[in-house]
Amino acid sequence: MRPDIKPTGRQSRRSFLGRLGSLGAGLALAPAALGQATAAAARPRLKLGLDNFAVRAMGWKAHALLDYAASLKLDTLFISDLDAFESHEPAYLREVKARADDLGLQIYLGTWSICPTSKAFRNKWGTAEEHLALGLRMARALGSPVLRVVLGTGEDRKTEGGIQARIADTVKVCQACRSRALDAGVKIAVENHAGDMQAWELVTLIEAAGKDYVGANVDSGNATWTMEDPLESLRTLAPYALCTSLRDSMVWEYEQGAKVQWTAMGEGCVDLKAYFAEFAALCPTVPVHIETISGFAREIPYLTPDFWKVWSGARARDFARFLALAKRGRPLQPHRSANAQEEQAYQKSELERSIRYCKETLSLGQR
């Protein structure tokens, strides 16, 4: 129905022109709003995959992981542990890649700490540089565009020199392998991991090492362990994002601060619709890898006297957003499986429920 814009006898010329102007402004805005909606609808759906740590209790190797990811109709598989491969020899890796290609899956590869002074570092794969070089070689053979690595954990904030010293040591290792990464066409994706770095601290590591070959593996759950709102962490890391390990989180207050319990997607207090709307706009080519790690709560006792000694660089605005998140949350009960089989079933249930939520509610995935 066309709106009535004729002046009545009781209308003044001024009020009539005001109504006409308002209508014109609305009509002028309509094409822009329609264009934005059309652009959003035309934007390709984000790729969806799983991080194999989500089903760690299964003990699956690469071929079993590929078959499982294919059964869930995923786009990518993030194998975040070199132990998931029966061999590191080129012929075996070519076989794994061929299987992934046959299933229509792209492999993303990851490994653990490459910081030689981290409490989390293990010399299983040699020195830090040898470990990184091995991972880069394997990533190239598997067709992975990245190699995910970590610095360490929150315990490294308590070491001599603090987290800044550990960042400097990690930068040196990355720089020692720069030519290998560039020659392989593989970027090093450093994760904000287990309470080691806030997003802005990870950015300093990437910038110091060189963003031409180093970027970020964005972990939304780990952001809550460093007193950050996952959405704000995403905004900081998005320009550097190469891959992801994502889950939901429930955050709530208790007498000494806050507690964080990671959850299946859609079962925490993070606004995931807002999160993935920004994700799609900021890093549309980066895959969404679901890494559910549920069942326990981590205490963040920020009201205790000694807590802030290792967080001297924390930013008030980031902490304020984390507090707002905690006020939205509610306590959850922990989960403990009675045996290994029950834990396997629990992990698969958490992941598969999350995948369904991502596909059905968040419209993620291209298959």
Image: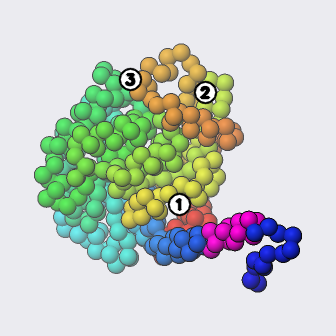
At 19% across and 37% down in the image, what residue appears?
172
**The one of 193 and 100 positioned closer to us in this rendering:** 193
What kind of element bears circle 1?
Answer: helix
Q: Please state the extent of the stretch shown in magenta in the rendering.
A: 14-27
How far apart marks 1 and 2 lie (CA) works out to 30 Å
Q: Which mark is residue 277?
A: 1
How far apart marks 3 and 2 lie (CA) works out to 20 Å
**The one of 218 and 136 positioned closer to us in this rendering:** 218
Quadrant position of residue 354? bottom right
Residue ID for mark 3: 158
Residue ID for mark 2: 257
What kind of element bears circle 2?
Answer: strand
Quadrant position of residue 2? bottom right
- Identified by mark 1, the residue type is Ala
What kind of element bears circle 3?
Answer: helix
At 14% across and 53% down in the image, what residue appears?
180
At 34% across and 78% down in the image, what residue appears?
102
Pointer 2 local density, CA inside 10 Å: few below 14, some 14–19, many at least 20: some
Q: Is residue 306 left or right of residue 332?
A: left
